[in-house]
């Protein structure tokens, strides 16, 4: 156990969780500063030595470095530096059989990294991505960060160039999934930091698929905050660099359609939907349809329902009802609660367009009380509730109260 103060251990753990060297940490601090502050910072080598001293616990950073650290990691000052903020380290510490099993594999193989360890890490990435739709974001975030911490230690180990690139890809996928969890929790500053890390690792690994997923993920974040033009640009950019016909290429095309729908562009929306149809038609059902980064053809109707409901197309109601029935009956082999919640909100929006506010209210209440609505989708519930309130539906008050209880407002 390190005999350094808890805050120093947190600084080091947070940096390693990003897979950064201390020199790279100095670069990140400088880039987080405004122009006036940056002009007053010491040279890179001096700042790197300061970081070594801070992580060794010799003395705490003072302003402006405390502020810069918080910007870089997307954390509050008390969380990162406060003596009582011990909750930060466990998020990225080793605990549990998953990490112990990985380390045992590495030791048995008598190698610093080795193919067996990388195989297990890649399998762990698939397991975590498959757990994404059914695991609460805070819980999954803890698991992913523990794996990231383990991966960061392996970057200092001896390995071949091929092993190094595989490790970079693993770090890229884990960083991408970390960012996605933060988006689900509406922790956008942390999400952006991890998304940049994923993009950097994808570049080092020359991994175009991860790079494209970074753009697609950022496009979804833009949708959740109402920046539809940016979502359109990002989703089109993802298609440009994604391998043709890959899962991310299809997902980015569908994301483009949703952005067009929010912008009220009917012809462009329908063109995107037709392109998705052509891409999905030849696809078999994947072995793990819940895998977040493997396109499941059954998603197609769900995306159509969402897109058409955002466009205000009457056909959205039929699609949403069909999707909801299939998801709740486990016709595809399992109940998909998070997708079912999304389908309920699609249906509620379509019912409002069809002047059926009473049923829309009932459907929305079921979504709010399902326990499966993540914070990144709260805006969709607010959208429906606002429309129901505007129509003076008697149940509007109950909906608003349910929303406040859910969102803690």
Image (spheres, rainbow, N blue to C red):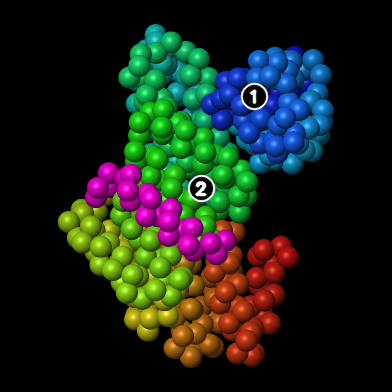
Q: In which quarter of the image is residue 210?
A: top left
| Picture quadrant where residue 119 is located | top left
Magenta residues, start to end:
225-247
Whichever of callouts 1 and 2 sits on the residue coming sooner in the sequence is: 1
Task: Classify the position of the N terminus by image quarter.
Answer: top right
Task: Specify whether residue 38 is in view.
Answer: yes
Per the image, the residue denoted by label 2 is: 180
Closer to us: 74 or 48: 48
Q: Is the magenta stretch mostly helix, strand or loop?
A: helix
- Where residue 4 sits in the image (x, y, percent)? 75, 17
Residue 327 visible to the viewer = no
Above-or-below relation of 44 to 188: above
Residue 252, above or below 85: below
Please tell me which residue is depicted at 67% across the width and 80% down the height of the picture. Answer: 398
Disc 1 designates what residue?
26
Give the residue at x 40% y 45%. 213
Of circles 1 and 2, the one toward us is 1
Instruction: Calculate the distance from the C-alpha at mark 1 to the C-alpha at mark 2.
Output: 26 Å
| Residue 280 % position (x, y) | 24, 58
């Amino acid at each position: 156990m390190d005999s350094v103060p808890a805050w120093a251990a947190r600084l080091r753990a947070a940096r390693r969780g990003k897979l950064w060297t201390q020199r790279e940490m100095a670069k990140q601090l400088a880039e987080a500063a405004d122009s006036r502050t940056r002009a007053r910072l010491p040279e890179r080598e001096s700042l790197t030595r300061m970081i070594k001293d801070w992580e060794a616990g010799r003395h705490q950073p003072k302003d402006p470095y405390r502020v810069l650290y918080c910007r870089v990691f997307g954390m509050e000052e008390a969380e990162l530096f406060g003596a009582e903020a011990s909750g930060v380290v466990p998020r990225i510490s080793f605990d549990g059989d998953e990490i112990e099993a990985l380390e045992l594999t590495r030791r048995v193989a008598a190698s610093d990294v080795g193919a067996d360890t990388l195989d297990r890490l890649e399998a762990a990435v698939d397991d975590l991505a498959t757990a994404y739709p059914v695991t609460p974001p805070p819980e999954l975030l803890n698991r992913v960060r523990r794996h990231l911490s383990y991966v960061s230690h392996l970057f200092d180990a001896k390995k071949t160039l091929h092993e190094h690139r595989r490790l970079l890809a693993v770090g890229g996928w884990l960083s991408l999934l970390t960012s996605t969890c933060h988006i689900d929790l509406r922790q956008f500053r942390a999400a952006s930091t991890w998304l940049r890390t994923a993009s950097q690792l994808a570049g080092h690994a020359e991994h175009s698929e991860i790079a494209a997923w970074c753009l697609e993920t950022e496009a979804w974040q833009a949708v959740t905050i109402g920046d539809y033009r940016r979502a359109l640009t990002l989703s089109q950019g993802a298609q440009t660099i994604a391998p043709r016909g890959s899962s991310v290429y299809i997902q980015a095309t569908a994301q483009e359609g949703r952005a067009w729908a929010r912008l009220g562009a009917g012809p462009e929306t329908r063109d995107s939907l037709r392109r998705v149809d052509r891409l999905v038609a030849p696809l078999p059902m994947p072995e793990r349809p819940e895998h977040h980064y493997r396109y499941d053809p059954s998603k197609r109707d769900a995306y159509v329902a969402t897109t058409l409901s955002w466009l205000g197309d009457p056909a959205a109601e039929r699609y949403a009802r069909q999707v909801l029935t299939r998801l709740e009956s486990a016709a595809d082999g399992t109940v998909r609660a998070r997708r079912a919640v999304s389908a309920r909100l699609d249906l509620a929006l379509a019912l409002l367009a069809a002047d059926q506010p009473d049923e829309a209210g009932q459907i929305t209440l079921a979504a709010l009380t399902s326990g499966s609505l993540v914070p990144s989708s709260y805006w969709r519930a607010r959208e429906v509730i606002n429309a129901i309130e505007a129509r003076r539906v008697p149940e509007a008050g109950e909906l608003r109260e349910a929303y406040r209880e859910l969102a803690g407002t």
